Each structure stands twice: as C-alpha cells, then as structure tokens.
C-alpha cells in the first residue's frame, strides 16, 4: 500500500473567517480543553452538573430534565445495575423509543462502568435478536412501552425496566474508576457477510470528537441542539455529547412519530440553535417550508452521512437566517468526524456536489494509490484516516479489523482506517468525496452493505439471482432497486418480497423498487454488468391486489399526489403506500400536499394508519365533514348522492354511511 497524496497543512482564510462567525449571540463560548480528552464521559458530564445543576439538559414532548435531575436519574439506574450485577465490564443492551429515557439509560450504563449497545425497536425482531446475541449483552434495559418486545428478545438475558427499578437506589454519584480508554458503546451497521456488524468507540475518542465540534462551532451552554438521528446511528453520538458535555440543552425529536411537517414549529418554539441531520432529512424538511417561517435562533446547520448538493445549499439560503452557517461534514462511525466544509450565504459552490472540505484536528486524511485518474488530470484514491482516535475495531471480527485498520506507516502511535470511499484532493487541501469504492452505500444516512440485501433476497425460494443497486434521481434522492431473476415462471409479487425482507431487514434496507429480469446483464468476460441494469421505470409494481381506479374527485387527486411523490405512472386506490416503495420521508411529502390540497389538518401518522388512497380518502372526507361550512357540505353530499350504497360504504366506511341520512340537511 502506497500513499498517493497526503493532506496539505493549513486551512484557507475564507474558511477561518466563516468559522469565526459561529458564535452564539450571548458570546459565552468557553474552549473545550484538550486535557479533557483524558477524562471519561461520566466525569465530564458530572462536571457540567456541578456547574449548572438547574440548567435544562433534555426536553421532549413527554419529559423534561435539568442537569441535576438527569444526573440523579442516571445515578439511580447505575446503582441498580451495580447492585444487581456487581462491578465489572460488560455490555448492556438498550431498547427504547427515541426520547429522554434513552439518554437516562445511556448515562446510567456509562456511570456503572459498562458499555451500551442501542437497539432500535423499529427493527425486525430477527435482527434485534441477532444483535443482542452477537454483542454478548449481559442485561437488556428497557421501559414499559417496549417491555413485551424486550421479554420476547431476551430469552437468557435479564431485563431491567428502568421505570420500576428499585426506588431505594441512591441518587448520588458512584465512586467508580473510569478509564478514558475503555469502551463506551457498540453500534451495529449493515454487514457484507449478510449479518450486521458492530463497531466500538472509546470514551476518549468520543470526547476528542466533542472537543473538535465544540471549538470549531463555538458550542456553549446557551445552545439548544436538535436530535433527530436514531440512537443506533453514529451521528446521534455527536449530538448527545456535544450538548451534555458543554452544559447545553438537548431536544430529541422523533421524526417517525411526529413527521417533518411539525419540525419547523418545534425548532421555532424551542429556539433551537444547532440543527444536525442527514441531507435527505434536511431536503424533505426544507420542502415542507412555506417561506413564511422564521428561525431567528438557528445558527448552525450540520449535514452528513450522504452527498450534499448545490440544491441543498440553495434551500439553506432560501429558508434560513442570514447569519446561519451551513456545514457539510464527512465522517464514519469508525473514525468519527474527519472533514468539514463551512458555508455562509456568500460561499460560491462550483458544480453540483459540495466538497467535504478541510482538516479536522488530529485527523489526517491520506489518499491511497488505488489507481484512478480524474477527467481533470487529478488523481483519485481511497480515502483513509490517520489518527490516534480511531475505533478499536469491529466487535468479535479480528479479520475485518485487521483488513481496514492498518498500522502507522511512519511508525507512530496513530493507525490508518481505510474508509472504502473514493476522493480527490484539491490543491488547497479541500477534499472532494466521490462515492464508495465497494458495494457499500448510504441511503438516507444509513450505511448499507448491498451484499446483505442480496443474500437475504436469495433466501427466498422463488429467487434464483439477485442484484441490488443504488439509483440517484434528478433531485438527488437516492433509492435502492433490486433486480431479480426468478427460479420459475411464477414470479413473486412486490408485496410478498417486501414482507419477506421485513422479517430480516430494517425498513431503510428494503429496496423501493423490484425489477424482474429473464437474466442479468453480463460483460464480454462473463461478469455482471451493473451499468447495463435498466432504470426502474414508472410502471406500477405488481402487488397482491389488482389495480382499481379512483371513484371520486378526492381519490383521483390523492392518487395523483401519490403517483407524483413515488414517481409512478398510476396508483390504485387499494395500493399500500409502503408496498409501492414509500417510506417515512416520502410520507411527509404526501401529507404536506394533502394538507395544502384539501385544506385539512391530518397528522403524519394518518398515512401509516390509512396507507391506501381509499383509506386516506375516508380520513379527508371525515375531516371535511367535521370542519366544512354548510355550502361545502351540500357539495360533498351531492357527490355522495352519485355513489351507490356499496361505493359509499367503501369510500366512507360502514359506520359513516349509517350516519348519513340523504333526505336530511346538516
């Protein structure tokens, strides 16, 4: 292995000037000290508790904790763990919905000297069971909401319900030694072997990353940070500790439950100052904005996990304050953040892709000589990160760890992590990210091994060959498309395939489209020709139910909305939105258009509860009947008159038809 190019030293003056503007209006920034890297997360958190016990630490719709309250709740849990398990190092799994109790559990586990392993309850049971078993977790922490799922998963693992753990537990800090070099957590990502793989991080690596974020963005105790990433996703780590190790306030927001249409109000109401998400979430969120919203307190927008495009910068410039700074970041769970690019309202963006930018302290980027040359003559290589602050490696995977983590070629204390991403370095040291070298991709910010999806598809009895590819649309939206060769004449429906995959894979790993082929395209030497795989097209997929056309103006408009959002030629009234390839972010687009088109107020969850056009039409008509003026009711009744009794039952539901007297005026 030879180094093609090293990272030039220095950051351009214009980048320094933009970073200098990242100051909270209070001007209360205190630099995060380098010596803090030699302390553990509990020690640094308790320091903030002593400094600001009554300051708000975490706020959700259901819970509010000051620093003192959060510390005491975490201490009670930690004492309960130590009392039941004794002292020692062990892994503890966490099964919680997105919210404040997860934060209590994380701190409680760390204070007890343990390693936490977050499990997302929205994942398939089979996947959760694998992660629980593979991590060798000795305990499963949960709450009453997820207790039944926890009991089903934990056959031989004790379950602790944090809502009913012993109330006599002390609320005082534990007198335990915490090593900054010990593991803090294990997170699981998609694996190329067909099963998830776990990677770990230490306390000092997390604190180091927090120091870099704090000092570059001038984070302070007056900041309020939005947390939308899943706790099983590495980006949540940066948000949690950037808040709690700085005395700032953390605001978890559950997109799956709340939807993006209410996010603007959450930001405004809670005066959020720092926003962080993957680009896809930001893109969908920005499209819900009308232009009338004002975010006077928002000062930093961080995007990471996927490519950022010029159009994303344009959305930022259109909807957010003049003094707000936009940051494109590059990082991985294994190396945490190692590149960033700061943008203000005047920063020129050349081309369609936004660079990932310049150096992060103690994280040197090198390009390895894997051979390619760009059209402009620049050399392209694999992005690798050289640092002392890299993950110890993959849990129970020494072979994989030795493959991607290499010793320092100069003989120092650093190691080199091969990211598997391709990039090229501009003369001034700005890094341009060019995508994956292998078949690992990122979809809506989640890292996905294509091989895991393909291997799962091949487990289906009706599938002989399977290939999955990432497609990118004109607007920058990315989606997974599966190409399948069936074993016989009987081809499985998309409904059947999606349900089959849902038993083993989380939603973000299920392809949005399935293309059946007689055979896979091959190159002249007999290898799979991925470039020859056809675009998925706009045809309605083959589902279990047959196509039924809309029967009313409401259904017609709804079908049009769904077809536009999903990129299909037509949608039947009994087609399930999610079987057509829809997901939660596309659902926000549908609900936003429904609200604007029909002037009704419907929550995001209504699409999950009414996932067909026919079901949603019922929701809309009921809403209109409840809120419409008399002239509108006359018009709707006239439309109902034109329906047969059977059609009325299908459109309104039996219960509502019984309540309609066609000879009576409301």
Image (cartoon, grey):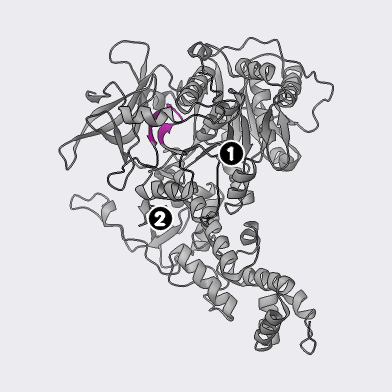
Give the magenta range: 328-342
Image quarter (top left, top right, bottom left or bottom right) of the N terminus: top left
Residue 156 visible in image: no
Q: Is residue 621 something that shows in the picture?
A: yes
- Residue drawn at x 65%, y 89% is 642
Asked if residue 6 is among those painted magenta in the image, a careful observer would answer no
Q: Is residue 331 magenta?
A: yes
Q: Can you say which quadrant of the picture contains the C terminus?
A: bottom right
How dense is the environment of label 2, judged by Cα within 10 Å: few (below 14), some, or many (20 and up)? many
Write down the residue under mark 2. 482
* Percent position of residue 564, x then y: 46, 67
Tag on residue 272?
A: 1
Label 2 with label 1: CB-CB less than 8 Å: no
Label 2 vs label 1, nearer the camera: 1
Crowding at mark 1 (Cα within 10 Å: few <14, some 14-19, many 20+): many
Who comes first in sequence, dot 2 or dot 1? 1
């Amino acid at each position: 292995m030879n180094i093609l190019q090293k990272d030039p030293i220095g950051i351009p003056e214009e980048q320094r000037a933009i970073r200098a503007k990242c100051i909270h209006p209070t001007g209360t920034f205190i630099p995060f000290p380098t010596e803090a890297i030699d302390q553990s997360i509990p020690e640094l958190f308790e320091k903030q508790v002593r400094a600001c016990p009554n300051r708000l630490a975490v706020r959700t719709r259901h819970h509010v904790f000051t620093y003192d309250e959060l510390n005491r709740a975490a201490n009670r849990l930690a004492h309960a763990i130590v009392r039941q398990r004794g002292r020692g190092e062990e892994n503890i799994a966490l099964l919680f919905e997105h919210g404040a109790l997860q934060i209590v559990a994380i701190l409680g586990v760390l204070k007890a000297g343990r390693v936490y392993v977050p499990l997302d309850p929205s994942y398939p049971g089979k996947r959760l069971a694998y992660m629980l078993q593979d991590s060798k977790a000795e305990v499963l922490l949960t709450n009453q909401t997820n207790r039944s799922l926890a009991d089903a998963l934990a056959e031989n693992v004790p379950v602790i319900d944090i809502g009913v753990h012993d109330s006599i537990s002390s609320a005082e800090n534990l007198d335990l030694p915490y090593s900054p070099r010990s593991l803090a957590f294990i997170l699981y990502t998609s694996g190329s072997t067909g099963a998830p793989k776990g990677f770990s991080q230490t306390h000092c690596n997390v604190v180091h990353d927090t120091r870099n974020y704090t000092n570059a963005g001038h984070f302070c105790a007056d900041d309020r940070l939005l947390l939308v990433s899943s706790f099983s996703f590495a980006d949540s780590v940066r948000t949690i500790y950037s808040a709690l190790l700085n005395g700032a306030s953390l605001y978890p927001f559950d997109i799956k439950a709340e939807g993006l249409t209410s996010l603007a109000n959450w930001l405004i109401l809670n005066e959020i100052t720092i926003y962080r998400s993957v680009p896809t979430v930001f893109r969908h969120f920005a499209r819900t904005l009308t232009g009338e919203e004002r975010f006077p307190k928002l000062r930093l927008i961080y995007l990471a996990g996927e490519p950022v495009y010029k159009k994303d910068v344009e959305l930022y410039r259109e909807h957010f304050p003049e003094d707000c700074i936009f940051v494109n970041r590059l990082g991985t769970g294994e190396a945490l953040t190692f590149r960033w690019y700061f943008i203000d309202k005047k920063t020129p963006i050349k081309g369609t892709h936004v660079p990932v930018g310049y150096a992060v302290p103690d994280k040197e980027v090198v390009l390895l000589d894997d051979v390619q040359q760009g059209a402009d003559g620049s050399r392209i290589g694999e992005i690798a990160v050289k640092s002392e602050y890299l993950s110890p490696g993959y849990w129970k995977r020494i072979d994989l760890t030795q493959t991607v983590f290499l010793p320092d070629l100069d003989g120092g204390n650093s190691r080199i992590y091969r990211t598997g991403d391709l990039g090229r370095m501009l003369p001034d040291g700005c890094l341009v990210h060019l995508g994956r070298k292998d078949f690992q991709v990122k979809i809506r910010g989640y890292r996905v091994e294509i091989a895991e999806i393909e291997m799962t598809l091949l487990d289906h009895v009706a599938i002989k060959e399977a290939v999955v590819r990432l497609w990118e649309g004109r607007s920058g939206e990315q989606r997974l498309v599966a190409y399948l060769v069936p074993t016989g004449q009987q081809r499985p429906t998309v409904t059947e395939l999606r349900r089959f995959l849902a038993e083993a894979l989380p939603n973000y790993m299920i392809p949005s489209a399935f293309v059946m082929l007689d055979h896979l395209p091959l190159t002249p030497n007999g290898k799979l020709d991925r470039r020859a795989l056809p675009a998925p097209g706009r045809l309605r997929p083959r589902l279990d139910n047959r196509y039924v056309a809309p029967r009313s103006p409401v259904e017609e408009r709804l079908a049009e909305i769904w077809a536009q959002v999903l990129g299909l030629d037509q949608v039947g009234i009994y087609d399930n939105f999610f079987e057509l390839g829809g997901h939660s972010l596309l659902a926000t687009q549908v609900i936003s258009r429904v609200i604007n088109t029909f002037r009704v107020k419907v929550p995001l969850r209504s699409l999950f509860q009414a996932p067909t056009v026919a079901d949603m039409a019922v929701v809309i008509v009921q809403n209109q009947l409840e809120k419409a003026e008399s002239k509108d009711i006359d018009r709707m009744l006239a439309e109902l008159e034109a329906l047969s009794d059977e059609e009325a039952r299908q459109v309104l539901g039996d219960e509502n038809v019984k309540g309609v007297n066609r000879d009576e005026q409301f």
